[in-house]
Amino acid sequence: LVVPEDTSEVAAAPGESPLLQLCCTPCQEKALRAILEAVSSKSSGCQRVLSLSGRRGRGKSSVAGLGLVAALQRQRSVVVTGPGCNSVQGMFRFAANVLKEADLPDGPLQSLMFGRAR
């Protein structure tokens, strides 16, 4: 997924996922829709690899955090990789804030853990 330069605002339709309404741009919404489709797949045992790229400041960490929340809501396992702790910290912080603000059971929030590969 590539997050382009478009920065016009998102107008979420009534009845859409609350996560989509948190997107700030149509590009973020498009990326989140693709993530939602991937995590909503009913294929048993199907593993997917998602990669999100774009220029600096396009909201990639926010969209990835929203996607992480969507996956946890659907009881999916997610592995996030990055070259260093600082690379993924913003995404985890955003996901944790969304989970805290949402009226969800504690299960998904407790599933949000940070680890370091050896």
Image (tube, rainbow, N blue to C red):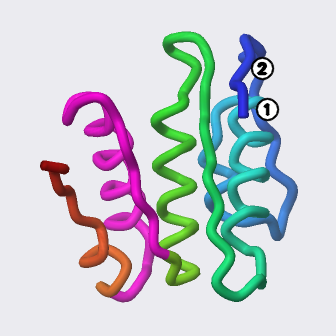
| Residue visible at 49% across and 59% down in the picture | 68
- The residue that label 1 is drawn on is 26
> Residue 92 appears at what percent x and percent y?
32, 49
> Callout 1, which amino acid?
Pro
- N-term mark: 2 or 1: 2
Q: Are marks 2 and 1 in contact (CB under 8 Å)?
A: yes
- Crowding near pointer 2: few (<14 within 10 Å), some, many (20+)? few
Instruction: Name the element at disc 2.
Output: loop
| Residue visible at 72% across and 41% down in the picture | 31
94 falls in the magenta region: yes
112 falls in the magenta region: no
Range covered by the magenta-colored residues = 77-105
Count of all numbered marks drawn on residues in the image = 2
- The residue that label 2 is drawn on is 8
For this view, does 41 lie left or right of residue 97?
right
| Residue visible at 73% across and 63% down in the picture | 38
